[in-house]
Image: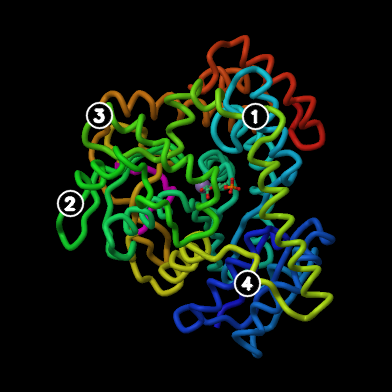
Amino acid sequence: PFILSIAGGGSTYTPGIVKSLMVRLEDFPLAEIRLYDIDGERQAIIAPVVEKVIRDHSQSIKFTVTTDPEVAFSGAHFVFAQMRVGQYKMREQDEKIPLRHGVVGQETCGPGGLAYGLRTILPMVELCDLVERHAHRKAWIVNYSNPAAIVAEGVRRLRPNARVLNICDMPVAAMRNMGAILGVDRHKLEVDYFGLNHFGWFTRVLVDGEDRLPELRRHIAKFGLLTEDAAQTDPQHSDPSWVKTWRNIKPIMDHFPDYLPNPYLQYYLMPNDIVGHQDPDYTRANEVMDGREKKLFAAAAEYQRTGILPDAFHVGVHGAFIVDVACSLAFDLRQRHLVIVENKGAIANLPYDAMVEVPAYITSEGPEPIRMGAAPLFQQTLLMQQLASEQLLVEATIEGSYEKALQAFTLNRTVPTMQHAKAILDEMIEANRDYWPRL
Ligand code: G6P
Ligand code: MN
């Protein structure tokens, strides 16, 4: 049985991930679960909920809660990372500063994602070092920490040998919705997909050897990437904002034949439309703080008071997917999953060493990317520009370079002019004083 540490134990996602682990104990046996967070107070609120979720399924799994990295990682076999540097308060800034300049306000797309990257790269590298120092020699970090594309590139540059697998739940959430539309379990789908994280396209959706993508496109043209009644099996992605996001992919699909875009492409391909519908005084961070976060904190308080745990946390693909990936790593299952991985020719006309998002076989030594062929010129160009923006941001972080940060902001498709880039960057430097390296 494995020792598993969750870095970012105080996250609202932790109970859902642990619940997913509990229903898969036969596939992924656990001796111990450790929660680790630098915010001990926040983690202490979530921990009793997590403990209850564990005890409902197992009396024998040891449960440890700590802010000490040595305690957290000593001998650990797996680390699930989900850090949010600066927490939701800083997500709010990431979203609101660009919006004040008429630019998309989003946690991973546009200037918000770049700002979040400048906060997260170095702490993520620090986490890699702590795990390398304390954990099992063959330990894997499975990383959900955002902005995943930039974090992946930062870790590749600074710790090329770290055993980190970067993942995102968005492609698999899209597959869940496709499955719901087609009436088949998502595990039955075999997809082809190419791009960067939060920036890619499905090119094939096979069910029993038959490509159902044309059928899906016809459905999406009417209802978006959702079932007709928008019924979802997953609470995280079924609140009104997410329903809007899934529906809104219709315009970015309609005019482009063949492929099916990742919903996040709407931020890059129709930013005006997005900004027009965003409230600069109340963004997604506010929704999450007032919704998911409050609900979980209230449930934790109620549990302390009454001993009864209300069902207030999200269980769905987010938790299920990280457990799927961990199983494949642990037992060399070589399952095919969509992950973020060094290209190595998977997308023939992108740089060999770019961090791309494609299907890969997940072996015990890591992901083996599957060849997706060459991207058409339109997609290749978009991808190259986005890649350059992300790579310059990483270099800005490493070198403390204002100039490269400005280039990264300017190259981002959501940013119309260099003046916008500079104004937003300068405000963000102020807001991120406690977090960013000095530029
Ligand atoms: C998806 C993405 C994550 C992102 C999350 C935000 O799951 O894959 O990268 O962090 O959405 O969701 P939220 O509900 O917090 O806005
Ligand atoms: Mn993601």
Q: What residue type is labelled 2?
A: Asp
- Residue that badge 3 annotates: 376
**Where residue 227 sits: x, y (%)?**
36, 52
Sequence-wise, the earlier of marks 1 and 2 is: 2
- For the residues marked 1 and 4, what is the alpha-carbon distance in whole angstroms? 44 Å
Q: Do the residues labelled 4 and 2 touch (CB within 8 Å)?
A: no
- Residue that badge 4 annotates: 76
- For the residues marked 4 and 3, what is the alpha-carbon distance in whole angstroms? 43 Å
- For the residues marked 4 and 2, what is the alpha-carbon distance in whole angstroms? 41 Å
Under circle 1, the secondary element is loop
**Where residue 297 sits: x, y (%)?**
76, 61
Q: With respect to residue 402, does 267 lie above or below?
A: below
Sequence-wise, the earlier of marks 4 and 2 is: 4
Q: What residue type is labelled 3?
A: Pro
Q: What residue type is labelled 1?
A: Asp
Q: Are marks 3 and 1 in contact (CB under 8 Å)?
A: no
- Residue that badge 1 annotates: 279
Ligand 1 within 8 Å of disc 1? The answer is: no
Q: Magenta segment, which residues? A: 337-346
Q: From the viewer's side, name the closer residue of 191 and 149.
A: 191
Numbered tag placed on residue 211 in the rendering: 2
Q: Do the residues labelled 1 and 2 touch (CB within 8 Å)?
A: no
